[in-house]
Amino acid sequence: MSGFSLLHLVSKSQPGALSPRKRLSGLCCRIRVSGTKKTQVKSFSQEDLKKRLTPLQYRVTQDKGTESAFSGEFTHHKDEGTYACVVCAAPLFSSHAKFNSGSGWPSFSDLLKKDSITESDDFSIGIHRLEVACSQCGAHLGHLFDDGPKPTGNRYCINSASLSFQPKQKVFVNCSSEAEDCPAACSSVTEKSDL
Ligand SMILES: [Zn+2]
């Protein structure tokens, strides 16, 4: 058996074996991409989602919709913080990776965590695009393009409707708490530092 396996491996490495592999490369690519999809960690009932999401958030995240360009609340949003999945609250992007692409949609050059997003082929408008979805719940987010700024070169073109924003919490002087509703003593310290 081992002899057969070795022969089999050797024969596959021969130049003559390349043509069928090449012919199947497109198919292999699609299988590979779909194979990277993970089992979703979180799932929600449609009833629950329809209750807590706006109609636009539901259409974009669940039906792969797209909000109108320049219409989203985060397109020109510049506050420091973290952008999370609007469905499951998984942190996706840092405000530090956000840039103005001029596209009309929030654009990010990098992910907060490498495996937070799942990529898949999208031919829905007749051209090949890479759709990006939340790895944790499968919510549609937008698309990934390769014309972003260096060093990543990535442009994650994301619908505002797919995102929620968590502002960076202030750290109060002389206080270990990072909560905005810090005790009065800490607020007074903050006020002093502003003078
Ligand atoms: Zn999610």
Image: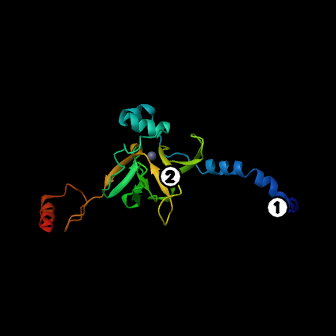
Residue 160 higher or lower than 113, as above or below: above
Residue 67 higher or lower than 132, as above or below: above
What kind of element bears circle 2?
A: strand
Horizontal relation, residue 64 to residue 188: left or right: right
Dot 2 corresponds to which residue?
A: 117
Residue 16 higher or lower than 73, as above or below: below
Query: At 52% across and 54% down in the image, what residue appears?
Result: 145
Give the foreground label among 2 and 1: 2
Dot 1 corresponds to which residue?
A: 9
Q: Residues within 10 Å of mark 2 (few under 14, many from 20)?
A: many
Q: Residues within 10 Å of mark 1 (few under 14, many from 20)?
A: few
Horizontal relation, residue 81 to residue 153: left or right: left
Q: Position of residue 123 (x, y in %)?
A: 60, 42
Q: Earlier in the sequence, mark 2 or mark 1?
A: 1
Q: CA distance from mark 2 to mark 1?
A: 35 Å
Query: At 63% across and 49% down in the image, what residue appears?
Result: 35
Query: At 37% across and 44% down in the image, what residue appears?
Result: 72
**Mark 2 close to ligand 1, CB under 8 Å:** no
Query: At 44% across and 49% down in the image, what residue appears?
Result: 158
Marks 2/1 in contact by CB < 8 Å: the verdict is no
Q: Position of residue 133 (x, y in %)?
A: 50, 47
Residue 75 higher or lower than 186, as above or below: above
Give the amino acid at mark 2. Ile
Q: Position of residue 95 (x, y in %)?
A: 37, 58
Whether residue 134 is visible, yes or no, is no
Residue occupying the far front of the picture: 102
What quarter of the picture does the C terminus occupy?
Answer: bottom left
